[in-house]
Amino acid sequence: MSALQLRRIAMVLGVLVILWVAAQLLGHTSDQVRGSLVLPHVAPETSDTITIGHGADTVRLVQRAASQWTANGFPAAPGAPAELIAALDDTSPRELASVSASSLERMGVDSGAWMVSVGPRSHPKFTLLIGNAGPEYGTGYVRLARSDTVYLWRGALSSLVRRPAEVWRDHHIGGAMPDSVQRIDVTGVGKAYSLRRDKQQWLLGAVPADSAKVATFLSQLRSVEAQGFATAAQLDSIARAKKSARRTLTVRGAGAAPLLALTFDSLSGSFWVTKPGDPTVYRLDNWQGAQLLPTAQSLTAHH
């Protein structure tokens, strides 16, 4: 090979290198992070607001006091915000997935991504965009706002941010430990009745109740958890419903105050439950409401 040919090959290679560098610069002008993704530490006791957004849907988590969080102004599910903080603070290595703006849509980290922002909306500490699932189970693509660098994130973050807004809310309605229950009053289920503990047995009025069925009933009262919450439209329907269809459940112990007091409205295939001092309207499925409101006949001992 002659010297002239070698010079021509070198010139071609030089041009190719220049074109590759130019393509990288032009396709990556907004990149801010190269090689690694390190987020500011989010402490469990943070006073910052954590906002999750996707389209028009927003979940805003705020810590009012130690371990007392709200989700969109309602009490948050215990442990849920801490789970999200732990996911954000996960220091597992992030694999560099792309440095090109042309890959953002394909990886789902464009305008349609899920967003997690920590700090005030006016000047958050950081905003992370979360896109499509990655090639491995439990992975997803992420990038910082105003950056074209995309990383493969390993951990629970991708699944956590996709929780519906009501899942972040506290679903616990109340409960009563079986050993503490002395009397149960139910109204609106056929005929109202009272179930009371008498020494070693339970009585329906003066008639012995079925001990096994009562034990099952008491187990349902241990912890009452909602399936969801009423929407604004459903609240209007509930308010217009006939009050004569309402049912009540009052569980009493040794003290004067009830251990549990619930009011049930049956509407649209669900039970809508309220309790004194709480404006929340909880949703129970029909089968769950039926377990909490058994008929007197179903509790009667048959000989």
Image: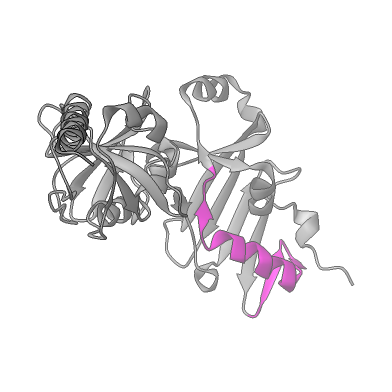
Q: Position of residue 105 (x, y in %)?
A: 38, 27
Of residues 53 and 202, the one drawn nearer to the viewer in this rendering: 53
**In the visual, does 223 lie left or right of 42?**
right
Quadrant of the snapshot with the N terminus: top left
Q: Is residue 51 visible?
A: no
The outermost residue toward the right is 303
**Relative to 72, residue 257 above or below:** below
Residue at screen point 13% across, 53% down: 41
Residue 20 occupies quadrant: top left
**In the visual, does 136 lie left or right of 141?**
right
Residue at screen point 33% across, 33% down: 109
Residue at screen point 50% across, 68% down: 177
The outermost residue toward the bottom is 200
**Relative to 180, residue 259 above or below:** above
Q: Position of residue 49 (x, y in %)?
A: 19, 39
The outermost residue toward the front is 2
Q: Is residue 184 visible?
A: yes
Q: Is residue 208 magenta?
A: yes
Q: How is the image coloured?
A: one colour
**In the visual, does 119 lie left or right of 212?**
left
Q: Position of residue 142 (x, y in %)?
A: 30, 41
Residue 10 occupies quadrant: top left
**In the visual, does 229 lie left or right of 277?**
right
Q: Is residue 186 magenta?
A: no
- Please count the marks in the image: 0
**Relative to 91, residue 61 above or below:** above
Magenta stretch, residue numbers: 200-227
Quadrant of the snapshot with the C terminus: bottom right
